[in-house]
Amino acid sequence: MEALRPLLSERSAVEQNRIEAAYEYARDAHEGVARKSGEPYITHPVAVAVLLAEMGMDSDSVIAGLLHDTVEDTTVTLEDIERHFGGDVRRIVEGETKVSKLAKVAKAQDPDRTLSDEQSENMRKLLIAMTKDIRIIIVKLADRLHNMRTLGSMSPVKQQRIARETMEIFAPLAHRLGIGQVKWELEDLSFQYLEPEAYRDLQGRLRTRQEEREEHIRSALTQMRETLGEDLELEEWVDHINVSGRSKHLWSIYTKMRNEGKALEQIFDLLAIRVILTPRPLALPAALPGEAPKPRDPKKQERAEEVREKRVCYHSLSIVHSMWTPIPGRFKDYIAVPKPNGYQSLHTTVISPSGQPVEVQIRSRRMHEVAEFGVAAHWMYKQGERLGLGDKQKEGWLQRLQQLQHEILDASDFVDAVKDDLLGGRVVVFTPRGDTRDLPSGSTPIDFAYNVHSRIGDTATGARVNGSIVPLSYKLQNGDMVEIVTVKNGTPSKGWLSFAVTRSARTKIRHHFRAEERSEALTHGHDLLERYLRKRQLPVRQLMRTKLLEDVADKLTGNRNPDDLYLALHAGKLTTGMVARTLAPQLEQERVPARPRLAPPRPVKEGQAKEGQIYVEGVLSPAKRAMCCNPIAGDQIMAYVTRGRGYTIHRIDCPNMVRLLKDEPEDRCRPASWNPSAAGLNTVELDVVGADRSGLLADVLAVLVGQKRSPIKIEAAVRGPSAHILLRLEVGGQLDLSHLADAIKLVEGVQDVLRAGNKSGRAIPAEARLR
């Protein structure tokens, strides 16, 4: 408690007593328990509370830090915590402990769950809880930071697992919340365990010239303080100027070297000077003699203070550039265009008097608090008053987090979506009205359109970026002004899935096509049943009444929804004959005369079998291949008894065979298989689908030449955003065809290789492709 007590001096006596009471409560609860390192367990919650107090978090958060492990590890209950410390503390502690308990329950119910499943479920619950009270994640970050500081007592396997989870989730979360000091330390600590050799090497190389660099920075700091202190405008506008030096963090240096392919000597901002300005409060306008000063309008006062804050920063920048030569292309204005997490600062790199490049960061005191503590800055105590998280901070990515919670049910997919869509690299673009949109790096106008509204995404036909027409696959850059061109009755294209980046856009595009396919399936199932009944002269209107269909659906599908009946008919899970017999068994028997069973073609002896013959129901029989689907050796097949012409072989996924199975007597469709001794070449047609680019056809033909294949026919065409190359050639069978398709798919830009010959006009299902 001695480490925590000095940090509480500015809080009221009541708040200090509450925190003291929470410490004693936690100490008694954890009595006799030790950590892996051998220290008393109470040292951990105290360290978490110290971190929270250093951030300036409110007393409820500090108390929750002291109590965050009591419910999970001791006999203390949430009701006990609420009774002693209030509902806010209970909610934060509950958010910390509930996630792991839920994961344990899930593990007990499903023993096959993996460690990854538990971690994903844990993370999902934590992220969802965070949207209800942001302090939950801030306490969790403090908890994780202290655990990372003491990770050395864990086994190497646990060190790796915890460090990776920290690097992938918690450090990006701290960055997204703008808590810079936590983010940097979490990254460096994770780096130490994930890549120990690289960490030690970089640390050693930096240490060799550390004294020289520190001497350079001390000299630059002295000159900077003197020059800024002598400026008359700053003397009038600013109460205090803090000038300090800092070293770039190891992980930041390492990723910059790795991503940009630079040597350590080429990194300009190893050293940085930070200038923090505290603007003087604006004086009230002078009052007439005998009158009290009139207070300003609060909104005008806030606007004036914001202008003063920016003015002192830009003025200080002009002083720095007049002192030292700036390096071209090394200036970033995050005050005019803040980062998505709210970070504001001016960054410039200059040549110091010693000839060394030095980065200078200039910001106000308020900007610095947001840069260091992010959303935690909004919970700080200032003169005894707690500042709550405002509406603007609740909007944006926290709302997006809530949307993902409803859109994605699987825990692993949810965590992946958060990592990709919310915690990865970002671009900030503008709407035509000047509003900003924060998107993942690599986003396209389609991602932007769905981010604005689903209807805009669905009806998009084109885009303008900075006034110029661009393709919908264009990758947006920071600062782009994006306008989406729509048409009233527009619909999405499946081609968008090849370049849409955000999980939200891809989900909405797929949802549109699933709804469209469901509608088509319902119509198809309804039409199949209606045609069957009409063909047999049954009373359609009487039999297809909703009440009767509900009874039949309940009997055949277990659900009283006729839609399920139609979907089952469409999918081939039920036959129209089965449904008709259930609808009206007596009418079916009366109106439909029995059809004579067709005698199968006379079997031949195995010794008389010719090349290409087929086994039908286990008997080797002559048969011909259907032209509609052109089956080849290795395809799954069925035989259809054709009057007077013997057996016709279809692929099992052939639309015509699907229709025959539904509409024809069962004895006319028979199981079939290939004769293993049959050999020879089969002619097939392939549809190679790819991005429309120059040289695609030549690259595909080069694959055929490399495999010594001579195509019989070649056609090429462009349909919408895709190019289609139709190839007719001979293959030895399904295995040979698969090897050829795999080789073609390696060509740059090729998206799929499909079997042609589907005369129904509908796409061959994914599971049936290349069979």
Image (cartoon, helix red, strand yellow):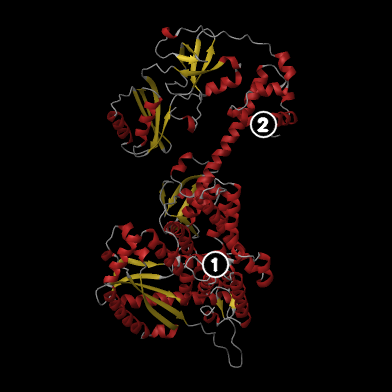
Of marks 1 and 2, which one's residue comes earlier in the chain?
1
Question: Which quarter shows the N terminus?
Answer: bottom right
614 w.r.t. 143: above or below: above
* Name of the residue lying farthest toward the left: 355
391 w.r.t. 320: above or below: above
Q: Residue at x 28, y 26 (%)?
A: 708
Mark identifier at residue 515: none
Of labels 1 and 2, the one closer to you? 1
150 w.r.t. 743: above or below: below
Question: Which quarter shows the C terminus?
Answer: top left
Question: What residue sits right under mark 2 in the picture?
Answer: 557
Question: What residue sits right under mark 1 in the picture?
Answer: 139
Left/right of residue 406 with respect to residue 276 in the rendered view: right
Question: Can the viewer see residue 157?
Answer: yes
Q: Nearer the viewer, residue 251 or 589?
A: 251
Do the residues bearing badges 1 and 2 touch, measured as CB atoms within 8 Å? no
Q: Residue at x 71, y 32 (%)?
A: 554
Q: Percent from the top left, x then y, of residue 751? A: 40, 37
Q: Nearer the viewer, residue 430 or 118?
A: 118
The three-letter amino acid code for the residue at tag 2 is Thr
The three-letter amino acid code for the residue at tag 1 is Val
Check disc 1: other Cα within 10 Å, few if <14, some if 14-19, many if 20+: many
Q: Nearer the viewer, residue 424 or 296?
A: 424
Q: Percent from the top left, x then y, of residue 402? A: 58, 55
Left/right of residue 164 with respect to residue 330 in the rendered view: right
